[in-house]
Image (spheres, rainbow, N blue to C red):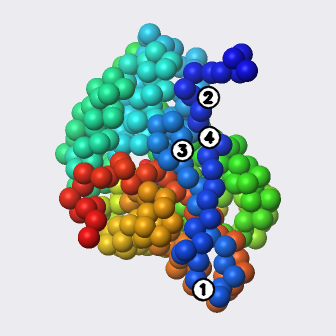
């Protein structure tokens, strides 16, 4: 019906779930499912928070189209989400991108009309966040600050979690999600645990920057997770366990998901699925239903030299 048609932001959410049967350990009775967040209009899970943070700030009267410039630090996907939301709602946008992010991401941002500042980085997000903070220091600028903005976990609690419960008939034994800001795992984990307190929530981080497991921040290749610090948005009480995954395992598993399941998987999908398969292989996981958040598509990384298929 024409009167139900909205602008592009109305296409965010309600993403499909697929079964990843080829990766279920044989004879384990485990069911493995992936939520395909690449089906959001900007191509990633971060479209949800881009819209939610903008709407929350509009509601509080902090920003208005034509008046406010939005400034954010992001490794790419939040920027792409903000870029199409800003274009659709009439905002100027500046993105501080840590160096070394894939070319596709930078080009996409510019195609939506965003200004991109590439910031020198040790591999994490710290320098880009600082740069955005100083650029956003003015009356006409606003920084959503995804790492600290409560609208980030809230939208996952309100949408991602309930969608999963509906799609899987209310039975989810294990949730596995990578941790960048921690918004996905916190919000979705809260929603699932409110429904069934026994749901196991597993967070995933890069092994070479395993800050949440008590290690040191360091360079890694799994774009979107492993910020290099403990993000304020992350509620550690919701996360039962952190699994650290190596860059190589993330890359190999991204290829495996693409080749064996036909779902083109990004790097952090590979990390999350590698962790999910590890959980699936445990004795106590027999007969369990495991859901993995698949944050974006492998297409977003197609030009990276280390992602070229072998
Ligand atoms: N994977 C990718 C590709 C991402 O862009 C992000 C967001 N930074 C995540 C995983 C992690 O999501 P969150 O920020 O909600 O922890």
Residue for point 52% across, 57% down: 294
Tag of residue 13: 4
Tag of residue 10: 2
Q: CA distance from mark 2 to mark 3?
A: 13 Å
Q: Position of residue 25 (x, y in %)?
A: 58, 83
Residue for point 62% across, 65% down: 19
Q: State which tag comes first along the sequence, 2 or 1.
A: 2
Q: State which tag comes first along the sequence, 3 or 4.
A: 4
Residue 265 vs residue 304: left or right? Answer: right
Q: Position of residue 178 (x, y in %)?
A: 49, 60
Question: Disc 3 or disc 4, which is closer to the eye?
Answer: 3
Residue for point 50% across, 47% down: 38
Q: State which tag comes first along the sequence, 3 or 1.
A: 1
Tag of residue 39: 3
Q: Position of residue 45 (x, y in %)?
A: 52, 46
Which element carries disc 2, helix, strand or loop? Answer: helix
Within 10 Å of disc 3 (Cα), the crowding (few <14, some 14-19, many 20+) is some
Quadrant of the rendering where the C terminus is positioned: bottom left
Within 10 Å of disc 1 (Cα), the crowding (few <14, some 14-19, many 20+) is few
Q: State which tag comes first along the sequence, 2 or 3.
A: 2
């Amino acid at each position: 019906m024409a009167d139900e048609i909205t602008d592009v932001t109305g296409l965010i959410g309600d993403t499909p779930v697929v079964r990843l049967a080829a990766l279920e350990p044989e004879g384990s009775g485990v069911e493995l499912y992936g939520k395909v967040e690449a089906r959001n209009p900007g191509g990633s899970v971060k479209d949800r928070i881009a819209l939610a943070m903008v709407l929350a700030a509009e509601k509080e009267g902090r920003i208005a189209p034509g008046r406010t410039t939005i400034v954010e630090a992001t490794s790419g996907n939040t920027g792409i989400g903000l870029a199409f939301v800003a274009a659709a709602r009439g905002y100027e946008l500046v993105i501080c991108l840590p160096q070394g992010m894939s070319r596709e991401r930078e080009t996409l941002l510019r195609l939506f009309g965003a200004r991109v500042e590439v910031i020198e980085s040790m591999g994490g997000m710290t320098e880009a966040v600082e740069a955005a903070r100083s650029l956003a220091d003015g009356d006409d600028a606003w920084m959503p600050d995804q790492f600290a903005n409560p609208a980030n976990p809230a939208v996952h609690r309100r949408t991602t979690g309930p969608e999963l419960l509906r799609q899987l008939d209310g039975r989810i034994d294990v949730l596995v999600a990578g941790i960048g800001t921690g918004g996905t795992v916190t919000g979705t984990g809260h929603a699932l645990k409110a429904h069934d307190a026994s749901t196991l929530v597993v967070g995933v981080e890069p092994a070479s920057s395993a800050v949440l497991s008590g290690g040191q921040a360091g360079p890694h290749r799994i774009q979107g997770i492993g910020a290099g610090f403990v993000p304020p948005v992350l509620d550690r009480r919701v996360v039962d366990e952190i699994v650290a995954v190596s860059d190589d395992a993330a890359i190999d598993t991204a290829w495996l998901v693409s080749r064996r399941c036909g779902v083109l998987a990004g790097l952090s999908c590979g990390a999350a699925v590698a962790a999910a398969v590890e959980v699936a292989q445990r004795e106590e996981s027999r007969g369990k239903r495991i859901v993995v958040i698949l944050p974006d598509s492998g297409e977003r990384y197609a030009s990276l030299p280390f992602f070229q298929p072998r």
